Amino acid sequence: MPGESVEEYAVYGALEVSHEHAEMLRTASARLYTLMTRLARLFQQADNQPLIEMGIPPSTIPYVRTVMPEMPDVMCGRFEFVMSADGPKLLEFNAETPTFVVELFHMNGQVCTDFGLPDPNLHCQQQLLQSIRAAIDAGLAWVEPYTDGGRSVVFSAYAHRKEERTTTEFYHNLLLSSGDIAYRTSFRGLNELRVKRNGLFTTDGERVDVLYKLYPTEHLMLDEDVDGTPVGLALMELVRQRRLAVINPPISFVLQNKALVAILWALHLAQSELFTTEEHDWIEQYILPTYLSPLDAQGQSIFTGQYVVKPVYGREGSSITILDHQEVIEHSQWNFYDKQVKVYQQYAGLPTTTIQTEKGATPVNLVHNCFVVGGTPSAIGVRACQKLIFDDNSYFLPVCSPAL
């Protein structure tokens, strides 16, 4: 993973992204965010069975149904796109626990400054700060008050995992740098938190009102104390009881689920009245045909060319297969999520370029990214990889705007 080995990660240089392409990425992200959040809110109110069928674990459903009405559905989330000849095509939405934050909101600007190039992410860090503060304020207003002292906001991740810790501390330090904070705030490793019946506490006894956790819900639900107590589910119950607010909020766990894209596509094919004519045009424009089965009602293959099989809560490029009919084109190195519900998505060829690495000129495939913070499209950036399936050994390729 980035920062966890001596593998080269950040490329010292910048890929020029036209103003048109930057605008296309941000427009696509704003439109898709509108459509996906609308659909996710409906699923929050749905019966259990549709949630289970899309791969949401049954034990998390009470948590998933918890609504924090004033909090942004996603404080900070990242869309991944193929930049095709027809514009951006959605690959997935990293809505609950995105990384690549420090790279696009901070490092990209530093590289552009070093080379004297225009930064397409200028002012995005201020957008992010506003979103962090808005999410915290909403969480503090939502959580049930108590009487013993002031309010507390904790940012937490695995302390020993560099990428997660650095990302979480970046959020925390950005908040601290803004000044005028009316609550206590700190970074704590996940091992420094204690779940009790009446709340979440730090190891030194401070009660937590709002928790930013860079820790996936599908991992949290499995966490147990040394005596077998299901502390992960207990933490989710605290949220349901309004004893704790979390960022990103529970709806982000629905948005993270890749089956939501397949359902969006199915509703489009059915010309659902959930969307306007213009919104159906957006779906046609940005969504690759995606399904919950590779076969149609007659048992025939839906796909006539290449397609991708991926788990609904897969991460870090694990358990993904690219197929051409039944022939495997590429398969993930790791298979951590093989037992999850799968989605089947039409494959779109990735754009390519050549970058300079420690190994010399290196041909790579590109995936374009756009963050959405508090519902607003923000920082853009590019990951590069020699393989078709991107994992945590992919390169961070800074981007710049055309020189003035």
Image: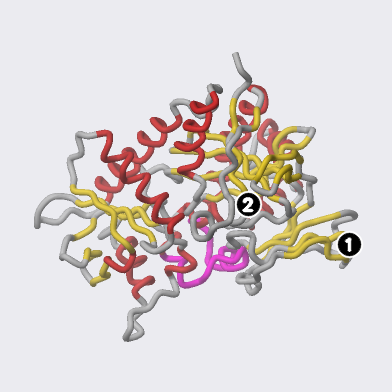
| Rendered position, 98 above or below 111 | below
Which residue, as the protein is rendered here, is positioned at the far top?
A: 404
Q: Which of 42 and 120 is in front in this view?
A: 120
Tell me: residue 230, above or below residue 236. Answer: below
Q: Is-magenta flag for residue 51?
A: yes
Q: Identify the coloring.
A: secondary structure
Amino acid type indicated by mark 2: Ser
In this view, the mark in front (2 or 1): 2
**For the residue labelled by badge 2, is the local secondary structure a helix, a strand or a loop?**
loop
Secondary element type, mark 1: loop
Q: Does the magenta stretch include residue 119?
A: no
Q: Name the residue under label 2.
A: 394
Question: Which residue is located at x 88 percent, y 65 percent?
Answer: 327
Q: Earlier in the sequence, mark 2 or mark 1?
A: 1
Residue drawn at (58%, 62%), measured in percent from left and top?
313
Percent across and percent down for residue 166 are 40, 51
Left or right: 292, with 98 as reference point? right
310 vs 223, left or right, is right
The local crowd at label 1, few if under 14, some if 14 to 19, many if 20 or more residues have their Cα within 10 Å, is some
Q: Amino acid type of disc 1?
A: His
The picture places residue 398, in percent across and down from the top left corner, at: 58, 36
Q: Which of 308 and 143 is in front in this view?
A: 308
Q: What residue does disc 1 label?
A: 325
Task: Write the start and end of the magenta stretch as one range.
Answer: 44-62
Quarter in which the N terminus is drawn = bottom right
Residue lying furthest left in this view?
148
At 66% from the left and 54% from the top, the residue drawn is: 390
